[in-house]
Image (cartoon, rainbow, N blue to C red):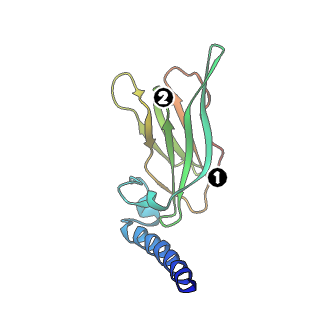
Amino acid sequence: MIACILSAALVVPTTVHAQTHVSANNVTCWGDWCSGKNPQDTHCADDATTIAEADVVTKYPDVTTNYGKLEVRWSPTCKTKWARLSLTKEMIVTYLTATQDSGYEQTWHTSGSDNTSGAGVFYTNMIYSPILRVYAHLVDADAYCDVCATNWV
């Protein structure tokens, strides 16, 4: 019985270490070389965490509606940040932007003539930002957004 318990305890850390190692090996950029690139395609999103978030809330005229979450994501491997928007219902979004306090931005624009974004996940390209702060914000075409930005992080 004791041998089984020790054996199981030794397998878990090895598995966790292997997954972390594999993720880092798949990354195709690092640092400033990642700026302007897609976090999914480069695998920088593999180890990313949310470091700031805000509910996407609109108010029209007196009805408050929550459409989802707006986040700033951080990849410790790539040293990058980007904006991610997770919509739970359709919203008319003109653009989603990650802005660095240096003024540098990465923006995702909706496609199509009506700027309608259905439920789903949308994100900007990355900004190399291990020291400078970044915040995420969006603009909705109808300008009903009551809360549509995160804090600086």
Q: Amino acid at mark 1?
A: Val
Left or right: 116 as drawn, with respect to 132:
left
- Image quadrant where residue 110 sits: top left
Q: Is residue 108 above or below residue 133?
A: above
Q: Is residue 137 above or below residue 62?
A: below
- Image quadrant where residue 56 sits: top right
Q: Identify the residue position indicated by label 2 in the image.
A: 89
Q: Total label count?
A: 2
Rendering coords of residue 94 (x, y %): 45, 29
Q: Identify the residue position indicated by label 1 in the image.
A: 153
Q: Amino acid at mark 2?
A: Lys
- Secondary structure category for the residue under label 1: loop
Circle nearer the N terminus (1, 2): 2
Rendering coords of residue 125 (x, y %): 43, 49
Pointer 1 local density, CA inside 10 Å: few below 14, some 14–19, many at least 20 = some
Pointer 2 local density, CA inside 10 Å: few below 14, some 14–19, many at least 20 = few
